[in-house]
Amino acid sequence: AYLCSILYYFTVIIVPILMSALLLVLWVFPIDKNRAIIQWIYKLLLPLQAWMGLDVFLMAVIGASLQLHQISEWIIDENMPGGCGPNGITENLFGVGCFSVDGHLTYGVILIALFVIIEWSLLILTLHNR
C-alpha cells in the first residue's frame, strides 16, 4: 500500500510540478548558453510526460463522478437482494435502498483540466520549436 501511495503522489503531484519547472526553464533561459543542459531537458520531457498521471487522474475523477451512484447501488443490491435490492426490506419500510454514493464535480476539476491542457500545449509547442 505504501508503494502505491508513493507512485500516486509521484505521478499526480511531483511529476507535473517538475515538468512545469522544466518547461519554464526552457522558455525563460536562453538556449545558446548551457546547450548540453537544454538538450538533457528536452530528452527528459517525453518520459516525464509519460509518467505524468494528471490527465489520467482527471478522466478517472470525471468517470467516477458520473458513474459512482450506479456502481455503488449495484454492488450492494446484488449482494443483498432481499434486504437492499428492489422490493427489499429497507426499500419497502423506508422507501430507500441500503447504500448509495453520489459523485459531484467541483471547480477543482476545471482547474486540473486547464492545467492539463496548458501543460500538453506547452509540451507540444516546446518540442515543435526545438
Image: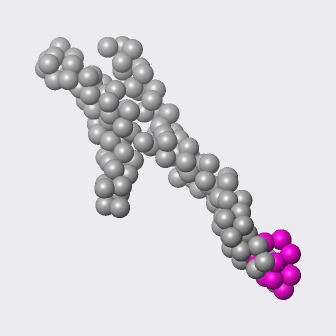
Please name the residue shown 27% across and 32% down the image. 22
Question: Relative to residue 96, is residue 10 drawn left or right?
Answer: left
Horizontally, is 113 left or right of 102 in the view?
left
Give how far across and how far down residue 90 sits, in percent: 79, 82
Residue 88 belongs to magenta span:
yes
Q: Which residues are magenta?
A: 84-93
Please tell me which residue is depicted at 52% across the width and 45% down the height of the picture: 58
Quarter containing the C terminus: top left
Inspect the magenta stretch and tell me whether residue 3 lies in it: no
Q: Is residue 21 above or below residue 81?
A: above
Residue 102, by quadrant, is: bottom right
Q: Between residues 47 and 91, which one lies in front from this camera angle?
A: 91
The answer to which of 63 and 14 lies nearer the viewer is: 63
Residue 6 appearing in the image: yes
Task: Identify whether 130 is placed above or below 112.
Answer: above
Quarter in which the N terminus is drawn: bottom left
Count all numbered tags in the image, as a single digit.
0
Counting from the top left corner in percent of width and height, residue 73 is at 71, 66
Q: Residue at x 56, y 51 (%)?
A: 61
- Residue 100 location in percent, x, y? 69, 69
In which quarter of the view is residue 25 placed? top left
